[in-house]
Image (tube, rainbow, N blue to C red):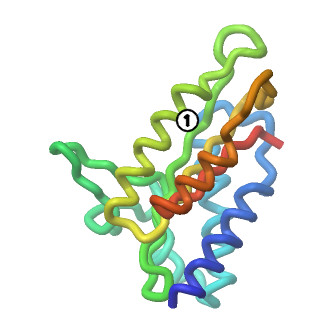
């Protein structure tokens, strides 16, 4: 089971890295709809299930989210932490997907990425206390800038994967 679920997550991460996200997106809910469709279609194909069954496997707000809330909630200090998209299936166990749409701030170059990154990683670490896999996807409205000095992005991704089973994806829109 572990090999199947690890391969499933690895392929899903690749899909999420490459999914087209139109530059017309302005709200996180619009991003969630695109990502949900991608996750749903990939899961349906990978597991070989039909339309009726997939809605008992992949969950999101406004569609079928309430059916999964008790399985996905992680309570810490009395606070409920709930995913944006959630997958539950016996061969996969549970996959918690946290989304952030990191908007432009002020002028064209400024980004809300620093705060969104910190918040999303915190939410993902909390989710990893209960769920087998966590995918943390942050889509930036602005281009991700290169800075002078050492960038620790790869080290962060590796540490989250190794220590917490979190796949971190930070990308710009299409």
The answer to which of 2 and 149 lies nearer the viewer is 149
Spot occupied by residue 37 in the image (x, y as percentages of width and height) = 65, 62
Across and down, in percent, residue 1 comes to: 51, 90
Q: Residue at x 67, y 53 (%)?
A: 34
Nearer to us in this view, 46 or 120: 120
Task: Assign the C terminus to one quadrant of the image.
Answer: top right
Image position, residue 163 (x, y; %): 47, 59
**Residue that carries the numbered disc 1 in the rendered image:** 117
Q: Single out the residue that lies furthest toward the top.
A: 107
Viewer-closest of 10 and 155: 155
Residue count near mark 1 (Cα–Cα under 10 Å), binned few <14, some 14–19, many ≥20: some
Number of marks in the rendered image: 1
Q: Is residue 151 above or below residue 14?
A: above
Q: Secondary structure at mark 1?
A: helix
> Which image quadrant is residue 10 in?
bottom right
Residue furthest toward the left? 78
The residue sitting at 46% across, 35% down in the picture is 119
Regarding residue 59, the answer to whether it shows in the image is no
Tell me: 108 left or right of 50. Answer: right
Residue 44 seen anywhere in this rendered image of the structure: yes
Is residue 116 toward the left or the right of residue 42 in the image?
A: left
Residue lying at 39% horizontally and 59% vertically, measured from the top left: 128
Residue at figure coordinates x 53%, y 62% from the top left: 162
Q: Is residue 103 left or right of residue 68?
A: right
Q: Is residue 3 left or right of residue 108?
A: left
Measuring from the top left, give residue 69's x and y in whole percent: 31, 61
Compared to 121, does 158 lie above or below? below
């Amino acid at each position: 089971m572990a090999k199947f679920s690890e391969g499933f997550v690895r392929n899903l991460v690749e899909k999420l890295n490459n999914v087209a996200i139109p530059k017309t997106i302005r709200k996180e809910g619009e991003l969630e709809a695109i990502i949900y469709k991608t996750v749903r279609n990939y899961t349906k194909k990978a597991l070989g299930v039909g339309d009726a069954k997939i809605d008992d496997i992949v969950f999101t707000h406004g569609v079928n989210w309430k059916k999964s809330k008790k399985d996905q909630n992680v309570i810490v200090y009395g606070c409920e932490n709930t995913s944006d998209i959630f997958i539950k299936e016996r061969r996969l166990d549970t996959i918690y997907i946290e989304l952030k749409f990191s908007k432009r701030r002020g002028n064209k170059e400024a980004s809300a990425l620093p705060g969104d990154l910190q918040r999303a990683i915190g939410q993902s670490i909390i989710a990893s206390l209960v769920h087998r896999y966590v995918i943390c996807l942050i889509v930036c409205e602005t281009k991700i800038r290169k800075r002078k000095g050492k960038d620790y992005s790869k080290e962060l991704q590796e540490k989250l994967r190794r220590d917490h089973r979190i796949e971190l994806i930070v990308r710009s829109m299409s």
